Amino acid sequence: MARGRFISLEGGEGVGKSTQVAALAAALEGRGLKVLVSREPGGSPGAEAIRKLLLEGEEGRWSPRAEALLFAAARADHCEKTIQPALAAGTWVLTDRFLDSSLAYQGEAAALGIEAVRDLHRFGSLDFVPDRTLVLQLPEAEAGARARSRDGHAGDRIGSRPPSYHAAVDAGFRAMAAKEPNRVKLIDASGNPATVTARLLYALGDLLP
Ligand SMILES: Nc1ncnc2c1ncn2[C@@H]1O[C@H](COP(=O)(O)OP(=O)(O)OP(=O)(O)O)[C@@H](O)[C@H]1O
Ligand SMILES: Cc1cn([C@H]2C[C@H](O)[C@@H](COP(=O)(O)O)O2)c(=O)[nH]c1=O
C-alpha cells in the first residue's frame, strides 16, 4: 500500500484555512483518496489538552520559550499518535497548521529564532515535515474582516496579539516559502472559496495520483 501524503495549510488569522481544509478534503475524497483532517495545536487527545493551555488564559501565562515548548510537545504527540499511523495506512492527512506556524509565530514574531524552533522540532518530532505546505495569503484588512465576521472581537490568547506581531508572522511565512520553495507554496486566498480550493489543488498537482 502506498503511503499517504501529508499536507499542511498555513497562514495568519482568518485567511480561510479551516474552510479550505474541509473543501480540499472533500475534493481529494472525490478523487478516491482516503483523507484525515486534523489541526494544530491539537489533533490527538494529549495535544488537544495542550491546546487549551496554549489558547486560553492571560496573555502573560507563558513565557515565549515555554510557549514554544508546549507547541513542540503537542506536535510530537500529534505526529506520533495521529499523523504517522494514518500515513502508514495509506490515508492522506490534511492539517490546519503545523511546524511553519511555530516557525512564523514563535520563531519570527516572538523572536526566538527559526533555528531554535527547528531544534525543538528535531527533538520532539524527529524533524518530520509535510510533503507540501500551502500558505494562504490575504491582505491583513481582508483577513481581519473575515475573522471578525466569525468571532466578533473575541480572539484567542495568540490571535489577540497586536498588528505588529501578526505582520511579523506574515513575514515569517514568506521567509519559509523563500527558503523551501519546493515544499512551501504561497497561495492567493482572495476570491470565493471554490476559487481558492482550485488554486490549492493546482499547487498539489505533482503529488496527486
Ligand atoms: N474565500 C472566502 N471568502 C469569504 N469568506 C471566507 C472565505 N473563506 C473563509 N471565509 C470566512 O472567513 C471566516 C474565517 O475563515 P476560517 O475560519 O476558515 O479561517 P482560518 O484561517 O481557519 O481562521 P483562524 O486562523 O482564525 O482559525 C469564516 O467566517 C469563513 O466562513
Ligand atoms: C500551531 C501553532 C499555532 N499558533 C497560534 C496561531 C493561532 O493564533 C492559534 C491557533 O488558533 P486557530 O484558530 O486554531 O488557528 O495558535 C502558534 O502560535 N504556533 C503554532 O505552532
Image (cartoon, grey):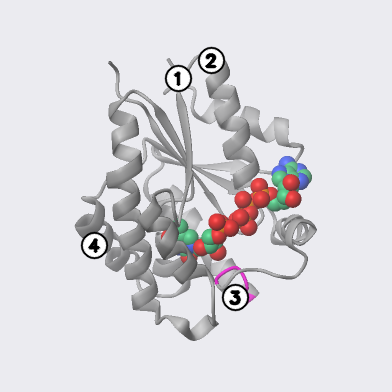
The answer to whether marks 4 and 1 mark residues whose Cβ atoms lie closer than 8 Å is no
Residue indicated by mark 1: 208
Mark 2 or 4, which is nearer the eye? 2
Q: CA distance from mark 3 to mark 2?
A: 40 Å
Mark 3 or 2, which is nearer the eye? 2
Q: Which amino acid is tagged 3?
A: Arg
Q: CA distance from mark 2 to mark 1?
A: 9 Å
Q: Percent x, y for residue 171?
A: 52, 62
Q: Quadrant of residue 18?
A: top right
Mark 2 or 1, which is nearer the eye? 2
Q: What is the number of callouts on the image?
A: 4
Residue indicated by mark 2: 31
Position of residue 154 relative to residue 16, above or below, is: below
The answer to whether marks 3 and 1 mark residues whose Cβ atoms lie closer than 8 Å is no
Looking at the rendering, the stretch of residues picked out in magenta corresponds to: 158-162
Q: Percent x, y for residue 169?
A: 52, 64
Q: Secondary structure at mark 2?
A: loop
Disc marking residue 119? 4
Of the image marks 3 and 1, the number of the one nearer the N terminus: 3
Q: Residue at x 53, y 81 (%)?
A: 59
Of the image marks 3 and 4, the number of the one nearer the N terminus: 4
Q: CA distance from mark 2 to mark 4?
A: 37 Å
Q: Secondary structure at mark 3?
A: loop
Residue 139 shown left or right of residue 75 in the figure: right
Residue indicated by mark 3: 161
Disc marking residue 193? none
Q: Which amino acid is tagged 1?
A: Leu
Question: 24 or 58, which is in the foreground?
Answer: 58
The answer to whether marks 2 and 1 mark residues whose Cβ atoms lie closer than 8 Å is yes
